[in-house]
């Protein structure tokens, strides 16, 4: 685990990617300094306060935060608070918060997730229950894994009063908010 932290602390992309890969392959049996590193980022109790006869690995897995812990190692800036966003039990993205700034990050496949029935070019959607939990002034970042285009918008763009978003109810999926592509800022990620 010390090697993972050393790789991470080098700070360059390749070293951090190596650290993430090692972390995913490890059995998550952590030393105290590794746990302290995660505890600081995830507001976990001190190692001494963990239940007796429980390894750190067992604790992290039991709390259901293994993926979140891995996301912290995968984050490029470690002073962000990272939390997973779920809708009806399914992880749909992550919320990164640093100070007063929050960014919802969703990774999608345009061929599967773009709602094409909204003219002229389709729209990206957010579940209404998830939208209502987002902080005010939250930025929204959608990464299309097929085209490597990153789409940016702000929460206010999805508000009914602004008039850009469309609202549709899809039975078991519930109320969805859609923002047409023309309102998104687009960046091609090479």
Image: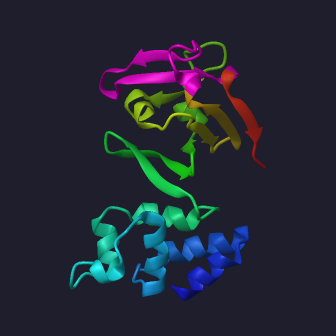
Q: Residue at x 48, y 81 (%)?
A: 34
Which image quadrant is residue 188 in? top right
Depth check, front residue: 26 or 163: 163
Along the viewing direction, whichever of 145 and 154 lies nearer the viewer: 154
Nearest the viewer among 64 and 102 is 102
> What residue lies at 34% left-to-right and 70% top-to-bottom?
60
Image coordinates for residue 139, horizontal then vertical, percent? 60, 37
Query: What residue is rendered at 71% in x and 40% in y?
Result: 149
Location of residue 62 in the rendering, given as x and y in whole percent from the top left corner: 27, 67
Q: Which residues are magenta?
A: 156-182
Q: Is residue 90 above or below residue 37?
A: above
- Give above or below for 19 relative to 174: below
**In the drawing, does residue 129 fall left or right of residue 181?**
left
Q: Is residue 15 left or right of residue 142?
A: right
Question: With respect to residue 124, does 25 lie above or below?
Answer: below
Residue drawn at 64 percent across, 69 percent down: 17
Q: Position of residue 125 (x, y in %)?
A: 51, 28
């Amino acid at each position: 685990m010390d090697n993972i932290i050393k790789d991470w602390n080098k700070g360059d992309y390749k070293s951090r990617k190596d650290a993430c890969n090692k972390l995913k392959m490890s059995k998550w049996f952590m030393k105290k300094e590794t746990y302290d590193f995660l505890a600081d980022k995830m507001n976990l109790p001190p190692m001494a306060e963990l239940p007796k006869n429980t390894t750190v690995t067992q604790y992290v897995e039991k709390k259901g935060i293994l993926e979140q812990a891995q996301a912290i190692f995968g984050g490029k800036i470690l002073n962000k608070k990272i939390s997973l966003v779920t809708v009806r039990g399914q992880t749909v993205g992550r919320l990164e918060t640093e100070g007063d700034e929050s960014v919802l990050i969703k990774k999608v496949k345009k061929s599967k997730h773009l709602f094409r029935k909204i003219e002229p070019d389709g729209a990206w959607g957010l579940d209404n229950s998830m939208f209502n939990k987002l902080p005010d002034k939250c930025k929204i970042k959608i990464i299309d894994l097929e085209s490597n285009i990153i789409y940016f918008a702000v929460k206010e763009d999805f508000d009914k009063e602004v008039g850009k978003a469309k609202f549709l109810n899809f039975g078991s999926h519930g109320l969805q908010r859609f923002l047409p592509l023309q309102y998104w800022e687009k960046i091609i990620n090479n």
